[in-house]
């Protein structure tokens, strides 16, 4: 079962790729709950939107269960994972925050770390891809590095695939996309959201 593989893989190598985490009809149902108008993504404090756009070009919207049953079901699945990681790996994950991301043609997200060692509440990152018509050459691949800047692997953002990794351990980037690219990023947190 993939939940066991996730737990094994996360605790040994620090990451796991879960293909077909959701099927295409589940992906389409989630998309139907997303409003047309999203917000320019923000990064740390004190960055102007202009500076920001040289780092990331996606638009996002935070997800809440109230946005529809498909979103609530996704959240429930993620909570099963949270509880399993707590029971079997003692990760102390107390909450989950998640947003939908849309990268227009040409957008990218430069190499970054989601959480620097001990500085924040993000412990485990998840990214679920939603691109049903993805072709090799469309760009928008996720590239994952170690802290020595060795490239570890590269991933096509295929619909239904979810990557899970330890937030502090893996710098990563999104290469420029040649198509609209949609995903849901999430973070298991060591603190409760107030
Ligand atoms: C992020 C991120 C990666 C991806 O939103 O922090 O790195 O593949 N996303 O979308
Ligand atoms: Mn990231």
Image (spheres, helix red, strand yellow):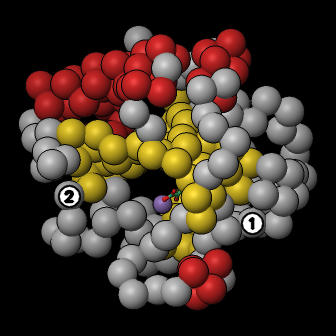
Figure quadrant of residue 54: bottom right
The reply to whether residue 49 is visible in this rendering is yes
Residue nearest the observer in this picture, 86 or 58: 58
Give the side of residue 9 with respect to residue 104, left or right: left
Residue at image point 66% right, 48% down:
37
Q: Position of residue 163 (x, y in %)?
A: 50, 40
Q: Is residue 32 above or below residue 46?
A: above
- Which quarter of the rendering shows the N terminus? top left
Q: Position of residue 106 (x, y in %)?
A: 82, 66
The local secondary structure at tag 1 comes to loop
Does residue 106 sit above or below 187 in this rendering? below
Q: Quadrant of residue 133?
A: top right
Q: Is residue 15 visible?
A: no
| Residue located beneath label 1 in the image | 107
Q: Quadrant of residue 142?
A: bottom right
Residue 94 to residue 174: above or below: above
Residue 193 rendering spot, x and y as whole percentages: 19, 47
Q: Left or right: 115 with respect to 112?
A: left
* Residue for badge 2: 121
Residue 57 vs residue 146, the one in the foreground: 57
Q: Secondary structure at mark 2?
A: loop
Residue at 34 percent of width and 19 percent of height: 76
Question: 185 or 118, which is in the foreground?
Answer: 185
């Amino acid at each position: 079962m993939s939940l066991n593989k996730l737990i094994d893989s996360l605790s040994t190598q620090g990451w796991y790729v879960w293909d077909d985490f959701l099927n295409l009809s589940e992906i389409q149902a989630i998309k139907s709950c997303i409003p047309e108008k999203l917000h320019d993504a923000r990064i740390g404090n004190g960055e102007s939107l202009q500076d920001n756009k040289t780092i990331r070009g996606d638009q996002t919207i935070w997800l809440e269960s109230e946005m529809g049953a498909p979103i609530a079901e996704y959240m429930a699945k993620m909570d099963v994972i949270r509880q399993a990681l707590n029971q079997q790996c003692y990760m102390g994950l107390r909450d989950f925050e998640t947003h939908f991301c849309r990268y227009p043609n040409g957008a990218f997200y430069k190499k970054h770390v989601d959480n620097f060692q001990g500085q924040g509440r993000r412990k485990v990152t998840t990214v679920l891809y939603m691109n049903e018509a993805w072709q090799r050459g469309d760009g928008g691949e996720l590239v994952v590095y170690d802290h020595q800047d060795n490239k570890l692997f590269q991933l096509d953002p295929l619909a239904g695939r979810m990557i899970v990794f330890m937030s502090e351990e893996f710098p990563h980037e999104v290469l420029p996309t040649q198509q609209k690219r949609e995903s849901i990023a999430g973070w298991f947190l060591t603190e409760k959201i107030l």
